[in-house]
Structure formats: C-alpha cells, structure tokens
Amino acid sequence: MVSPSIGTAASTSPIPATTASRRSRAPKKRGRPCVFAARRTARSDAAVHREVTNMKTLVPALLLGLPLGGARPGRRSGGIMCIRAGSLALVVAAALLSSSTHASRCPKACTGLLKEQRRTCRAACPKHKPGKDCRSACSAEFTTVKATCKAVSNPSPPACGVTSTTTLPCDASLAPACGGTCPNGQSCGQSTGSNSCICVNADETCFVSSAPACGGTCPPGQMCDQTDFGLVCACHSPDDTCALSGYPACGGTCPAGQFCGSLLFAGKVCRCIPNCLRSPTCGGECPEGQTCGQVSGGLCLCVPNDDTCSIAAAPTCGGTCPTTGQTCGQVSGGSSCMCAAADNTCGISPAPSCGGTCPVGQVCGNIPLYTDHCECVTLDRTCLVSEAPACGGTCPTGQVCGEGPGGGFCECADADATCFYFGRAPACGGTCPFLQVCAPIPGSNSCQCGGPQ
C-alpha cells in the first residue's frame, strides 16, 4: 500500500534531507570566481612582489588580447573564464614600476665618477679621529649628489646633473660642481687640468678655467693662456710666453737677462733660463739678488749673493756663506769650496792631518778608503780613521778592527766572520761561522768561508 505522505513522488528515489539542503545552498557553476582581490590582502609583500615581476611579461599579451599566462579557454564560454581585476592592476603596476626604475637610475659612468670624487674628498680630510666629521660630510655629500643624479633626466659625466652647493670646504667638495666654501672674496672652482677644487680670487679665475679656451681673469698686466703642461691654464705677463711655446723649439719670450730653452732634468718643457747658464765664461746675467759663477764640474749657475762659496775658487775659497758663523773652505780631498759650521770644520780640513772640529762625541780623522779625506766618526768607530795595517781603532760590540780587503784602510767586521775582510791568501787565517772554514778564493789573494775541504 502506498503511503499517502509520499504521493506521486513514490516513483522517484528518495533524497536525504542533508543532501537536498546542501544542493539548495550551492551556487550554479559559472566559471571560476574572481577572488584574486580578496586573496591579495592575505599575501605577503614578497609574494606580491613576485606577482608584479611575473606580470611584467604579460603586458604584450594583455595589449594584444591574448590569454594571460596560465589561463585556458573555458569549455562553456569558449574564451577566458576570468581575467582577475587584481591581475590587471598588477600588470599596470608592473609597467609603471619598470618605467620608473629605468628613469630613476644614475648611470654607471656617473656613479663611478661620484665614487671617485668621494674618495678624493675623504683623502683631503685629516687622518684618524680629527677627520671623522670631514669624512662623514663627504659621505653625506655623495648620498646627496647621487640622489640628484637619479632625479635629473639623462644625466651624463662630468656634471651628472649635480649643480647643488655644499657646506664643505672648497678643497673637500666634489668636482666639477665645486660648491664648497671659501674665504670672503674668493670663489670655489675646479682646478684647471685636474679633478680637484680650489679657492681663487676674483682676478685669478684663470686657474679654474678650461683649456684650450682659458677665458679666466688674471691680475693687471697679465693674460690667461694654455701652458705646455697640457690642458692647464695659467696667468703670464706679455714678455713671458716661453712656457706657452712648444718644445723643442721653445720660441717664446722671456724677461730681460733670460732666454727661452729647456733643461735636461726638467723634461720636455720650455722655461725661461738665466743667460748665466749658457755663457762660456760664467759672466752671464742672473735674476736680481743672484750671482753667476762656475760650480764643480765646470757648470755655470746663478747662486744667491749670500752663498757664493759654492762658486768660489779653491783653495782660497773666498765666497760668502748664508748662515752666520759658517766658514767657506776647500772640501777635504777635493777641489771645490763649501760652507762649514764652526763646530764641524772637519770636512774642510786638509788630509791626512785632519785637524778640524767635530760635534760632541765624534772625532776628526782621515778615511783613505777611496781618497784621503777628513770625516767625523763616532767614538765607537775610530777603526775607520786608524792607520793600516795596525788598525787599532774601536768598533761596536761584537766586532773587531782590521785591515780591509786590498789593504791600505781599516774597517770593522763581526768577530766570527773575519775571513773575507781580514784573511789573506794563501794562509787565510780569518774566522768563519760554525762548521765553515776559511779558504782562498781561486785567482785572488782574498779568502772566503765555505764548507769543509
């Protein structure tokens, strides 16, 4: 008998109440819901950053209307099931991030230049603790100028967009901006031909101008031009263009009493040289306050009027000396003259008598090593001025005095190694270190230490 509670539904399968309730609450499947924005807030910053990075490659696909990476055409709609609104926002953010990153980057060439200028700035600071504040200011300056470099459009060396000033001293500021401080009446600029900053007066801006134009100012009566040192500007008078002329011609002008030429020891540059240096009898002209004369070796030089001893003729040596109390005399064992203090006349006393004076704790004696000449020696090394072959002078502790190789002079040698210094072939009676013997040197009358024979 059919139950009346079931009615017409008796022919269908019964549905459990729990199942029916579950089905009534379930929404129809209409593709994957766009829940990315809700998940976005739960993600970590690192995950979001990775999402942005990945989305950079999706910009072309989005613009072309292609499916985004990982999306597949829905079987029901035939297209993309869901383009998440959050992904679209990230794509736009990725594009903006990419463009802003490239626009706010200081070029590598500028960064290297600014770092080099920071090193120069720090090198100008005092050492150790006194220069701590200065070095900190250099680092702060670097941070500021690098930020400026990032902020400007298309920065390039050498300026790199840096035009700001600084409170650092001029010589510690960074070139080419050189915004450091200077004393009143002076300005800070990049030193001509270098990468450093200097302070100059208003009438000396030539030294911070750029070659070859060299358009800076100079004191009255002078002009600014490029020198022969390269891209360097300097002030000069109209009658002194020698330094601006080219080597080896050296055809520039010089003040009276000088000629334009080059010196061997000065390199390939042109300089104004006193006429004294090319006069055959050393009678040429010299700058005011100097005298032309011949020095040792036959050269003519200009010397100060209060120091003519070096150009005086030996043995009379009647020249002047610059220091009060000095005496002009003939160099011991030589043919030139020199000045000597009153308590150190040994160097101008005649050998071998050597009766000159020496400072306290020294004695004057003849050293015949090369030529007879007088020299002051300390009291523990009188061996050097003692007479050979007796050699009875003193030596430092652990050494002995004897006649040196070849004979005719005395010297000190270690007590356990007198073989080479004092030994004479064929006897070779000198001492040697442990397990070595003193033996003749073949073809010589000298001796040396070696292994057992």
Image (cartoon, rainbow, N blue to C red):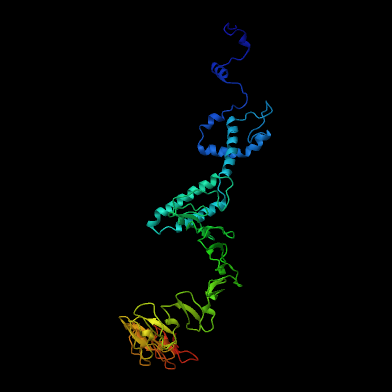
Q: Residue furthest left?
A: 360
What is the x, y in percent for residue 248?
A: 60, 72
Query: In the image, residue 229 lies at what x, y percent?
Result: 56, 66
The quadrant of the rendering that contains the C terminus is: bottom left
- The residue nearer to you, when weighing 389 against 449, is 389
Give the image location of residue 429, x and y in percent. Answer: 39, 91
Q: Quadrant of the N terminus?
A: top right
Q: Nearer the viewer, residue 72 or 161?
A: 161
User: Residue drawn at (44%, 50%), measured in percent from left and top?
Assistant: 167
Left or right side of 184 for 205: right
Viewer-side residue, 422 vs 150? 150
Q: Residue at x 53, y 38 (%)?
A: 47
Residue 253 lies left or right of residue 314; in this view the side is right
On the image, the x and y values in percent for residue 57 come to 62, 39
Q: How many marks?
A: 0
Q: Is residue 263 left or right of residue 291?
A: right
Q: Is residue 116 above or below residue 359?
A: above
Quadrant position of residue 253: bottom right
In this rendered view, identify the residue nearer to me: 37 or 167. Answer: 167
* Residue 415 is at least partly visible in this image: no
Find residue 101 and report its image quarter: top right
Q: Is residue 154 visible?
A: yes
Q: Is residue 227 above or below residue 202?
A: below
